[in-house]
Amino acid sequence: MGFSVVEVVGYLASILVVASLAMTSVVRLRIVSLVGSVVFVAYGALLPSIPIIITNAAVAGLNIWFLRKEFAPNRDLGAVPIEPDAPFLLDFLRSHAADIAGIHPGFDAPASGDFVLVLTRDGLPAGALVGTPEGRTLRLRLDYVMQAYRDSRIGTWLYGRGARVFTSAGFDRIVAPADSELARTYLERMGFVRTGDELAFTLAG
């Protein structure tokens, strides 16, 4: 039994909407939902059905609005210093321990004297960074962002406009082990360069 063009478009739109609900990334959810709503508009035009067109045009508009906010240069991102033994930090790391282990398999917990940041998005915790100071060099042990926000350009901000959080603490260089393929790929994308067995990032003065 064959399908008409209208049915194929309708099924495709439905698949995209369902797929968007399975996304762990906020950005990917919005993008897939946007594509699905646009396909649904096409489906409504083929029927034709004005209610389907209006509803999904509105959904597409909302997705575009939120994506525009997501990629805006003035997005509310932050990095807040916190004590290595702060209960909130330890609870956050425990809650995401399994995910962290897949990125930084050697990371256990912050040590006394570590430089620690809670990474925020719109004032809410989105990740954590842990490093051991060695003079003016910070030896990175953990750079973690929750799955939902990994497409939110938190890293781009942190190693760009937000890098003053490092320089204000007296660091001019960050080094990190390439302890997993995910970590290596991410850090190289942020501007780290390989130096021997490590990756290094020089902070602007």
Image: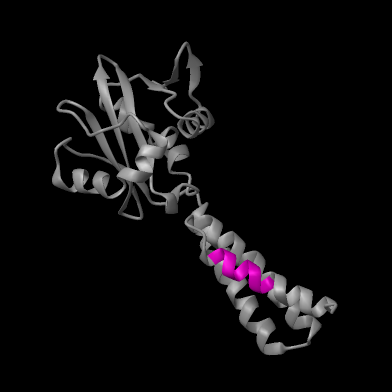
The residue positioned 36% from the left and 35% from the top of the image is 143
15 falls in the magenta region: yes
Q: How is the image coloured?
A: one colour
Quarter of the image with the N terminus is bottom right
Given residues 166 and 37, the one toward you in this image is 37
92 falls in the magenta region: no
Could you tell me residue 121's position as x and y percent?
Answer: 36, 51
Could you tell me residue 97's position as x and y percent?
Answer: 30, 44
Q: Does the magenta stretch mainly form a helix, a strand or a loop?
A: helix
In the image, residue 46 above or below residue 28 = below
Furthest toward the front, the residue is: 1
Q: Is residue 132 left or right of residue 53?
A: left
Furthest toward the top, the residue is: 196
The residue positioned 55% from the left and 70% from the top of the image is 62
- How many numbered callouts? 0
Quarter of the image with the C terminus is top left
The residue positioned 76% from the left and 74% from the top of the image is 9
Could you tell me residue 45's position as x and y percent?
Answer: 77, 82
In the image, which residues are magenta? 13-20
